[in-house]
Amino acid sequence: MINIIKLGVLSVLLAYAKADWPIDLLEEPIYRNQVDDTVYRLPEELDPIHYDIEITPYFEATANRPAFTFDGIVTIRLRAVQANLSALIIQENVREILSVTLTDEANVPIRINTANPFERIREYHFLKINLADGVTLVNGQVYLLTVEYIGNINETPLSRGVFRGNYVGDDGRLHWYAATHLQPTHSRQLAPSFDEPGFKSTFDMIVNRPASFGETFGNMPIRQTIQMGNRVKEIFHRTPRMSAYLLTLHISEEFTVIADNNDTARPYRILARPNARGQGEYALEVGPPITRWLENYLGISYYSMEENMKNDQIASPFWASGATENWGLVTYRELRLLVEEGETNANDKMTVGTITAHELAHKWFGNLITCRWWDNVWINEGFASYFEHFAMDGVDKSLELADQFNIQYMQSALSSDASAGTRALQHTVNSPTQVTGHFTGISYSKGAAFLLMLKHFVTENTFKKALNYFLVDRSYKHAFPSDLFNAFGRAVREDGTLASGFNIEHIMRFWVEQPGYPVLNVEVDMNTGVINLRQERFFISASTQGTLQVWPIPVTYTRGNNPDWNALKSTFVMDSRSAQIQKPAGREWVIFNVQQQGIYRVNYDTQNWQLIAAALSKNVSSIHHLNRAQIVDDVFALMRSGRMTYNLGFQVLDFLKQDTSYYSWYPAITGFTWLRNRFLHMPDVLAEFDEILFGYLNALITDLGYEVVPDEPVTRTLNRFFALTFACNIGHEGCVRDAAQKFNALRTSGARVNPNLRRHVFCTGLRKGGYEDWRFLYERRRNSNNQADDLAMLRALGCTTDNRARQEYLEMILTDEVKAQDTVNAFTFFYMGDRSNARVALEFLKPRVEQVRQAVVLPAWFDSVLSNLASYLDEEGLQDMEQWLNANRDTIPNYNVGLSAISSTRANMRWGTQNANIVLTAARGAAVVVLPTTMLFLSTLFALLLK
C-alpha cells in the first residue's frame, strides 16, 4: 500500500512545503505472543489452511435485509497446532453472527456448548467458539469451522472493510458499487478470519451479485457463472496462498475494461467506470514492462506464481489510500491510475508510473512473502517504495527516477527520522490503531533508503542475488528480518563482495532495530591530509539530549583535486564513534556521502564548508547535482539543529542564486518555506525575507520561464511546477502578473492553461479575483471528468479571499461534492490558500464540530483539522481558538490536540521573533540588517507575553 506524502496524517508545515500529493491515511523477530501486549493478537493455537467465502450483497433494502449489507458464509479449514483446546478464537468485525458450526474432516459434527456456543468480544474483534464440556481439539487434526453472518457495506472508504462508492454515469444517474479495502486489519469485516499477515491460506470466493450488475472483479478470474433468478452466482478460481488482507472484490453495475494488452498468457488490464475511457492508456503503457523488469531483476515470474494469475489494475473513485496491492486486482484512487492527456500534470502522471511500480513490487514483497506481523511492515513497504523508483527507472530513464529517489525518499527519510520520538524500522505494535500508525514515512522512506544504501554497499549483483534467495526461501510464507539478513549473508559470502571483517547481518540488524541516524562530523587538516571523523545521532532539535548510539556507516567520499562522483561503494564501515582517514595533503574540499546514497548527514569544519561554497560559486556544476541537493538539505537541517551558524549556512547556500537544478531547488523550497513560516506573524520581517527570496529565485525563474516547452525533460517541467507555485505564493511580481494574465485569459476567452501551470495560475487567479472568478472555477470543477484535475481545482478553490466564496467553499466540504478521502485536504487547502482564511475557518468550525467530525470520518483526521488550523492562525486567532477549546472540553473530542497545536504554533512564532535578525542578516550576506524600531519593540513585547 502507498500513502503519498509518506504516509500518516501530515503536519501543516510539511503539507505547506510538500503538498504535492493528497494526504493518504494510511490513513518482532519473535512472533509468539506475550501476555502483557497481545490483547489484540490471536493465540497461536490454530493454523488456517483454506477458506470458502460466499457473499450476497444488498444495495437496496429487502423484506429482511437493510440496504448496504451483505449475507456471508465462511468455512475455514484449519488445523489445531496445540493439544486440548476447548475453544477456538478467530477475528471478526461484522454486523451480526447468525450461527457457528464445527466438524472434523469427515464432516462429523464437533459438539459446541449449547448454552454459550460463541462469544463476541467486540473490543478486541474476537469471536470465541466454545466447545461442549469435555470436548477438546486434537493436536494436528484438521477441522472445518463454518460461520454464517451479516456484514455491513460501510458508507465511506475511510472505514475500510467492505464499503460503498458511487459515480455519475453518462446517463446522469448515480451508480453504486461495493469494494473491499482490507489492509491492514479489515479482512475481519469481509468475513470472520485469521486477520494477521503471518497467517496464510488459499481462498475460494463466491459472489451472488444482482443480475442487473456487471461482472464482479476479484483476485482471480471467474471460473463459473450460474444464473439464479434476479442474481448471478460467480465462482472464482482459487487464490495463491496468501494473507487474508490481500482478498479483494469490486461489485458494480458497469465498471469495465478501459485498456487491455490482449495477451492471454500475460494479461494486463486497466478497469474503471465506463465514462473514464481513454484515461487508462498510460497505465497500460507502463504496467507490463514494469512487471517484466521486476521478474527479470528478482528472478521469479509473476504469472507463474499461481495458475490463472491475472494482473488487473482498477481505478476507484473512492479509496482510502493511494493504492493497495491485492493479488490479481490492485485498487487505486482514480488520480493515481488514470491520466487524461491535456488535463493531468506531469507530477501526477509520473506518480501513476511510480505507484504502479510500487504496487507491482508488492507482488513479490508483501504478497509472495509477507512480514510476519506489522511490527516489520517495512519488509512490505520499504521494498515496494524502493522499487517504485528503480523499477520505473528501469523502463523509462527520461523520468530520472533513480536520481529523484534522493529528493523524494532519501531526504524524506532523513526528515522523518530526526526527532526524539521517532521509531525504528522494527517497532512493536499491537492494536489496530497502532498498526495503522506504523504505515508511516519510517516504514516507507527509511525502509527504501536503507535498501539503496545496502545495494551500494554489497554491489548490485549481490543485492539481486540476496533478494532472490530471500524470495525463494520464503515464498508463500511469512518472513522475519532475520530471514532477509541470512539471505544477504549467504550472497555476500558467496560473492566475496565484502572484506572478511564485515558482518553484513550485524550491520543490517543495527539499521533495522535502531531508531534515528547519525551525522558525520568531518574535520580536515589541509597540511597533513588527515581527516578526523566523529559520528553522533542527529536530532533536528538543538535541545534534545544526545545518545550513545554508534551506527555502522558505509562511508564514501571524494575530494576537490581528484573528484570521483561514481565512488558509491564504501571502502570502509565506520562502526566506532571516531575514526581517521588519510588523503593527500593540500588545500581542497572533501565531500562525504557521494551522491547521498547513505542514511546520514554530514557536517564539515568551517574551512571545508567555505571551500565547498567557493567551488560552487565559481562553477555550480563542479559538484554533482545529487551532492548539491544533499548540501542544500543538510545545510538547512544543520542550521535548524544549531550545528551550523546561519551566516555560514547562507554563505554555502548562496550558490542557489546561480543554480537552476531541480535537485537543488526541491529541498531549497522546503527549507526556505520552513523559515518563512516562522515569520508569518511579523509582516515587516516577512516582507524583507521575501525580497531576499526573490533574489534567490531570479536566475531560476529566468531560466525556466513561465511556459512549458514541448518535449522538455520531465524534471525541468517539475522544477517549474514547484518553483512557480512557491514564487507566486510568496508574491513574486513576475509570477503573480503572468499567472493573473493566464487566468483572466481563461475566463474571458477560454485560453487553455497548461496542466503543469494550473496550480499557481488557478490559485493566483482566485486570490486576486472575486466571487465570479471563484464560481467560474467551481463550475469547471463540477464538469471535470478526471480526478487529478478535480483535485487541482479543489486546491485552487481554497485560495479565494472573497467572503461569499469562502463560506460556500467551507459548506461544500461538508457535502458530497468533496469525497470523504479529500476532506482533510480541502480544509488544509483553505488554510494554505490565504492566511486570512484560517480565522474564517475557525468561525465556521465552532458551531459545526459534529458535522465536520462526520465529514472527515476518522478521529485522527478531525485531530488533523484542528492542528492544521492552529498552524495558520495569528496570535489573535490562537487566543480565540484557545478560549473556544477550553470552554467546550466536553463537546470537542481531543480538544487537547488543538491546545497542543496552539502551543507548537506559538513556539514557532517565538523562534521567528528571536531569530529574525540573525536569519535576515545571514541571508542578506555581509550587509547588516536592522529591524525597524517599532518591530523590535513589538517582537520583544510579544516574546514577554508568551513567557
Image (cartoon, grey):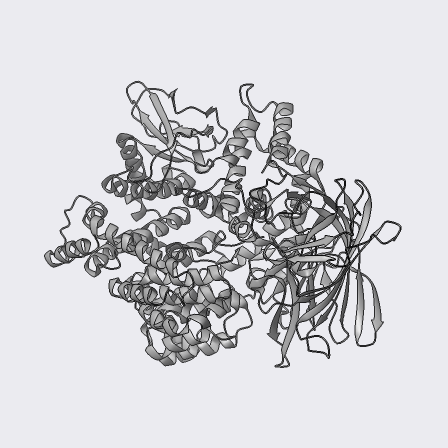
- Name the side, left or right, on which 426 lies relative to 240: left
In the picture, residue 945 is in which quadrant? Answer: bottom left
**Total count of labels:** 0
Q: Position of residue 660 (x, y in %)?
A: 36, 49
Q: Where is 155 relative to 401, above or below?
A: below
> Residue 767, image x and y in percent?
33, 71
Horizontal relation, residue 869 to residue 850: left or right: left
Between 317 and 269, the residue placed more toward the observer is 317
Q: Nearer the viewer, residue 17 or 904?
A: 904
Q: Nearer the viewer, residue 681 or 651?
A: 681
Instruction: Name the residue located 46 percent from the left edge and 35 percent from the top edge.
Output: 598
Residue 604: x and y in percent read 32, 32
**Residue 809 appears anywhere in the view:** yes
**Is residue 741 visible in this depiction of the protein?**
no
- Above or below, 357 against 575 in this view is below
- Residue at the extreme left of the image, as rendered: 933
In this picture, residue 621 sits left or right of residue 292: left
Q: Quadrant of residue 582?
A: top left
Q: Residue drawn 38% across and 71% down?
A: 845
Quadrant assignment, res 905: bottom left
Q: x, y (%) of residue 132?
A: 78, 52
